[in-house]
Structure formats: C-alpha cells, structure tokens
Image: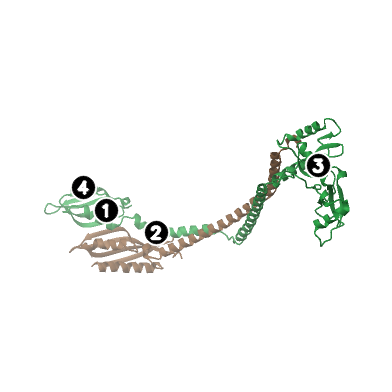
Amino acid sequence: MSAGGRSRAAALALLAGVVMIIGAAAVVPAGLYWSKTGEAIRDARTKIQRSEQRKQAEDTLVRSQRDWARFAATPSSGFILNSDDEAAIAATRQRIDSVFSELEGVAVSVAGEAGDGPREGVRSITIAVQGNLPRKNLGAFLTRLESEPAYIVISDFEAITSQNDQLLINLTGQVFRLLESGA
Amino acid sequence: MTEQRGFFSWWLGELREVFSGRPVPVHALALSSHEIALLEKGVDTPLGVVDTQAEDWLEQIEGLRSRILSRNTQNPLVEVQLPTEQVMFTKVTVPDDEDRQAAICSQIPAITSQQLDDVTIDIAPKPDADGMTIVAIAPASTVAEAARYAQEWGFNAARITSIESPKAFRRGPDFEHQGARPTGSALPKVAAGLGILAIVLSCTAAARALSIRGDLVQQVEREASEIIVTKDSSGQRELALAEFANAAATATDLRDVSLPVWRVLAETASIIPGDVVLTGFKYRRGQLILTGTTTSTVTLEEALDRSPIFNAPTLSSTSRSGGGRANFVIEAAVDERSVR
C-alpha cells in the first residue's frame, strides 16, 4: 500500500479483512464438517424412519388381522359358526326347526348339502326346506331367516295357501361357513 | 523489506492509536548537532532532512511539517529522537530485595555525577541475560529543549526517545517531558474488549455447536446400527390378509347386494289392491309369480307397474271365478338393483 493511501479507515478496513480471512479459515472447515455430519445424520434418520414405518405397517397389519379374525368369529359376520360342514348343516336344520316351531309352524323336511362358496375360503351350505306355517307369520318367518345371523340367502321361495290360512312353504337358500378363523 | 517494515509500522501504529485511545506517532523527528530529519517510523530513508546551518532551515522544517500535515489539521504528532551523544545507556545491578526504581535512582548521582533532578531516566522493563538492568539517561534540560523546539516548529512531541537504543527498549527509551501526550479515552479499549469477547463467545458457541453435532451424529448412527433389518414379508402377509378379509366379508356382502324375499313380500303386500286375495307367492331370483283372485286384473297390473321393484307385469293366465272375480296368474320381473 502506498503511503498516499494510508489512512485510519484503510487500517481498520485492513484489520476487518484480516479478521474475515481468519474467520473464513475457521468457518470453512466448520461448514464442511457441519455438512458432512448433516449427511450422516440424514442417512441415519432415514434408516430409522424407514424402520419405524415398517414397524408401524406391521403393527397395522397385525391389528387388521386381529380385527378381521375377531369379526369373523362373531355372529355379526353372518357366517354359521361351525367347524365343519356336517355340524353346519345340523345347526341350520335345528335353527329352521326352531323358527318354524316358534312361529306355530311345522318343518316337514330340511335338507342340506355343502359345496364350494362364492369366494375362496368360504363353504356354501345349500338348504331345501318344506313346511307349513300360518299366513300371519310369513313375514316374521322370512325376517328371522334373512336378517338374523347366520344369514340365509334365499334364492327360491314359494308360499301356497293350503287350508285354514295355512301356507305350504318351499324354499331354497344358502348359508355360508368360513373355512379359516384367520387367527 | 524496508517498505514492508514501513507498512507494518504504519498499520500497527494506526491500530494501536485506535485501540489504545491515545495518539501514537507514526513519524519521528531525529535531532542531531547539524541536521533535523523527518522519518516515517520503520523506514530507514527519511522523508526529508534539514540542515540547521542553512539560512532557511526554519522554512525547510515547515516544509517537512506540511508534508505530514495533510492528514491532520492539528500539529502532527511526532516522536522526537535525541542524538546519540545526548543519551547514555548504562547497566546497573539491582538487588532482588530492593525497590527497583529507588535502587536505580540512588545510583544515578554516582553514574552521572549529576543530581537526580538534572537528568531524566528510563529503565528497561526487563533485565538482560546477565541479570543487569539497562538504564537510559538524558539531561533533563535536553529533553525539555527538544520538546520545546518541536512545539515551536509546529509539531506535537508525543514522546522523546533516542535515535539508537539497545534491544532491551523495544520502542526506545521514553523520557518524560512537559506536555506529554494526553491520556486516551477508555471507549476504544472497551470496544476492542467487547469485540474480542464477542469473538471468543462466538468461537465458544461454534465449538459447542460442533461438539453437540458430533454427539448427535454418534447417537443417531448408534441408533441406526441397532436396527435389525429383517426380510420384509409384509407384502405376502398383506395379500393373505386381503384374501381373508374378502372371504370374511362374504356373508355380509351377499346380504347387502341380494334382494331379500321379505322385502319383495312387503312390497307386494303394500301395493296390491285391497280386493286381491293371494293364494300363491313364488319368488325365484329375478322373477315374481303371484296367483289369486281379484275383481280387476288391470288394476293389479297397474299397481305392480307403479312399484319401483317390479317391472313389466304380465298376466300369464286368467279365468273367471264366482262373484264377479277372476282367477289370475301374474308375473313380474324384480329389479334386484333397487335394493342398493
């Protein structure tokens, strides 16, 4: 610096420049270290986050499995809750006899046959029913079969007046049994 | 090399002046028996030399003064350097158990053959390698004259020293004189102290932040390393669950999408005219067949046609019955979508 350019402001500016250079010499390595550690932190956190997400997904899966298994084991699922086809047919027969009896009717015949269901993992029990029932109880009879579990999906139904306000009932329907409990 | 020394002398002098709060001379007046030289401190080549034997030496001194006056309207601050022959340097021994200043002052009369009041002394801050203390001695009258001359020539003598001095005096001896430079303000020192404090605190904070960052890295990396990565079978399990859920919803789904017979029966009971006597009710998926007697099959047909469930009612057979009534067999399509 020439003698003509020497002033107090120049001396202070020079000092500021020196301080800034020294500061930069300290800040740059610190910044590089900060950046490098930041990448390491980000990578580690990503790994942790993925692990937590996987665990949450597994927890959700387990909860869903448990909920579905619980639902399938309750009457509200609409299935007949028996472990095999024969027991399901017997239970259905008993239920229909019971409904007829409660509604002042008589079940003449109740036949059941097991077969493949409409979906995988589901068995279908096809039942054919004949019986006599008072005309006044026809609505209640159908409601009991179709709206209370285990639901019977009636595909064919015929009611013919016989005598003394009695109806001859013929129906064919299906009740479903779940093969696996899902537990 | 000379330029570098001059540069650093100027720069450090300016900074010292700023931060000490006291003016520090950047220039020096070197006095000798026949010459007066104006120097820039740290530079060997003088800015100008005045021969005191010349007739216009006072004008020449004013010329020198004007060269450094441009930066400051006040009298330029200078260091007055006494000629070598006017300053004596001597080494004295100071006993460890005595006051340093007093011990040296007591030796001055013996060294100089003058009274202490007649001389001005400056003591080197530290003893030399031999344990001897160097003392600079100048006549008090010479120091006073030098200060007075500088004042008369338009300079402000910040300090009075000698042209040459031992290394023990880093900036040369400093002889006290009348009109010594004033004590500076404390504000620049306070500002400098606060600035240094701010820098130290900033550095401490930065170091702390980096340290915490380092700890954080170690912590998250340790946590990440503790994660055991297992084979992800969730896809298969989700598929199995979906299949099971699909199966488990079969009964409720079919019930929801099937038109129950009780509803067909209820709809039939609600729409048929009051004179109709049903003797048969047959429902096969998608088709309803009613048998019975009525006074008007047309009315029955119209009633079925108005229902949102039944479509296209058709009389498949009809025959006369007693009492103005007719036997009928009527069929109608059942719209199972109406259940949804």
Residue at 55 percent across and 56 percent down: it is A49
Q: Name the colour assigned to chain A in the rendering.
A: brown
Q: Residue B250 carries which label?
A: 2
Q: Which chain carries label 4?
A: B
Q: Name the colour assigned to chain B in the rendering.
A: green
Q: Residue B302 carries which label?
A: 4
Labels 3 and 2 in the same subunit: yes
Task: Examine the image and state in which quarter residue A96 appears.
Answer: bottom left
Residue at 83 percent across and 35 percent down: it is B49
- For the residues labelled 1 and 2, the Cα–Cα distance comes to 26 Å
- For the residues labelled 1 and 3, the Cα–Cα distance comes to 140 Å
Q: How crowded is mark 3: few (under 14 residues within 10 Å), some or many (20 or more)?
A: few
A182 displayed left or right of B30 = left
Residue A24, image x and y in percent?
68, 46
- For the residues labelled 3 and 4, the Cα–Cα distance comes to 142 Å
- For the residues labelled 3 and 2, the Cα–Cα distance comes to 121 Å
> Which residue has dot 3 on it?
B145
- Labels 4 and 1: the sequence-earlier one: 1
Residue at 67 percent across and 50 percent down: it is B193
Tally of marks:
4
